[in-house]
Each structure stands twice: as C-alpha cells, then as structure tokens.
Image (cartoon, rainbow, N blue to C red):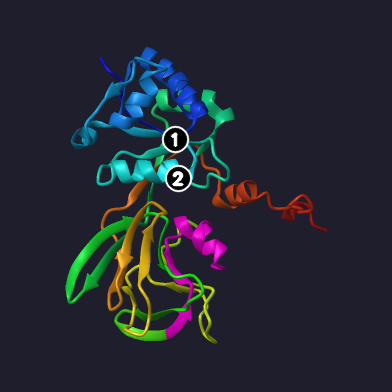
Amino acid sequence: MARGSILMVTHDASDSAIEVASSLIDSWTVEGWNIYAVADDAKRIEKLNKKIQTIAKDELSLIDLVVVTGGDGTILRAVETARGNSSPILGINLGHVGFLAEAEQSDLVDVIKSVNDKNWQVENRLCLKVEVKANDRIIYETFALNDVSIEKTIRGHMFDLILAIDELPVSEFGADGIVCATPTGSTAYAFSAGGPVVWPEVEAILVVPISAHALFARPLVVSPKSKITVAIPGNSTNGMLVADGRREFPLPIGSTVEITRSDIGVPIARLNDTSFTNRLVAKFQLPVSGWRTRKNLT
C-alpha cells in the first residue's frame, strides 16, 4: 500500500536542486511514497531519475505534501502551483536567505525521516487578495503570500498615489511605489523598503511606501480585516503591479488596487519547533554572541 503522495517542485535552473530532488525521490519511493511533479519539473527531474511521475494540476488534491528544492522564489512558484489545495509546502533551501524554507541541504537525513514518519506540523500563513479595478469593473485578480508592490514604470519621474484604508483617505504622495505585505513577506521587499519585521503569528497587513517624497509616508501596520486601496490619479503616470515578484500587471492611470485578506491561506509544513526569533537571527546572521540568559544575569 502506498504511504502517500508527494509533489516535487525544483528550481528551474539549478542542477543541484534536481540532484537533491533525485536523492529524496530514491529515499521516499523505497518507503512506498508516490512522487509526482507537474510537467516542466517532471521533464527536468526525469533526466536524472525515472521514478518521477507526471501529474496534472487539476489532480493536485491527491497530494499529501509539496516538497521544494530551491530558494524562496521556487517556494513561491510552488505556492502558485498548489494554490487552493490543502497540501502543506515543505521548503529545502538551496538559495541564499531562504526565509520560507524549513530545512537546509545539510538537514536531508532528518527531512527524509520526518516525512517518512509523517511528522510535520502545519502553519497556515495569511495571504492577500488583490483586485485591480478600472471604470468600476475588475480587470485583474491575483493573490500574494509575500507582498504586492505598486511601482512606477518611468525612471526619473515621480509616481503619484492616493492611499486609503477602509475606504477612508489617508494620504496622497509621490513615491517610487508602495508595498503591501503579509507578516510572511515582512522580511522581503517591505523590509528593504524600511518596513518592520512582523512575527508570522501576528495577523496584520503592512503598508510601506517606497522612497516617498512626503512628510508623512511612514510604514503602517493595519488590521487583517482592513481593505487597503491604492489609486493612481489622473495627474500620475502608468504603473506596474507585481505580486510575489512573479506576476505582473500594468496599471493604467485612473485605476485602483484593492488589497484585502484572502479567504485562502497558504499551509507551510514545519518539522521542528524552532522559534521565529532563532530563525531571524540565523537567516540575517545577527550578532547575539554577547547575550546572557536571564538565569545568568547577576
């Protein structure tokens, strides 16, 4: 009897990601797991491992676990692929920072055992729903696990924006753009733009202006129940919407972007109870060598 089904997602330009995936496939198929990949990933993997099976996207409800070999970008692609299914996503970092990943390449033995024992917990991460409207109709819809940015497209020109929260105006300012992020995405683009780091268990949405030319254009932390509206007024220029750094949509003058909490979250698999604080220190290599625990304080 099959132990269950795993979907493999690999970095699309990394030989090491395919090699790691192949090693995992060998270990798990021996234990009775069925290992699948969608078409493009399957073609890359099967050059090294013929045990991989191809699965159609409309069959992903059969998957018990999504395993990703790559960096945060690959994990975001896996989220896009598995969107709407309940399968948790387990990331093995082969990239740089890898905030979304649960394990490093050096942890493969532990990963293999934990999956065989079905020993993982699931964190359901807040996700954003994004709608672009023009002339009172929706012209584009998407989602974001990390962030959605609204950016200028013409270098050397100020990009005018109007920000409203819960349909009440907050400010109009010129900037390079604005980022709306989840707590998961607070360590990504929003962090680079000067936003705060938010612990994943905090339910909130960040609003972070990018290089704003205004007296009041500070990062905001708003309720997850709020609706954030960013309008591009007639005196502005065309913009570009980018969701999770993957999906782009051109924003015409006069359009508005509405951002709310999505009804569909993203399940992330965790293999241990490492705190976010320790993860933050490790990923950003923060200097904590001088810290003394409370019991050692005198």
Give amino acid for label 2: Gly
Q: How many marks?
A: 2
Q: CA distance from mark 1 to mark 2?
A: 8 Å
Which residue in the structure is indicated by mark 1? Answer: 11
| Helix, strand or loop at mark 1 | loop
> Is 189 one of the magenta-colored residues?
yes
Give the residues in magenta. 172-198
Q: Eyeballing the image, is 41 above or below 261?
A: above
Residue 232 lies in quadrant: bottom left
Q: Report x, y in % for residue 161.
A: 39, 79
Which residue is more in the foreground, 255 or 155? Answer: 155
Q: Quadrant of the N terminus?
A: top left
Residue placed furthest toward the right: 298
The label shown at residue 73 is 2
| Helix, strand or loop at mark 2 | helix
Q: Eyeballing the image, is 7 above or below 191?
A: above
Q: Are marks 1 and 2 in contact (CB under 8 Å)?
A: yes
Residue placed furthest toward the top: 30
Give amino acid for label 1: His
Left or right of 196 in this view: 128: left
| Residue 38 appears anywhere in the view | no
| Residue 284 appears anywhere in the view | yes
The label shown at residue 117 is none
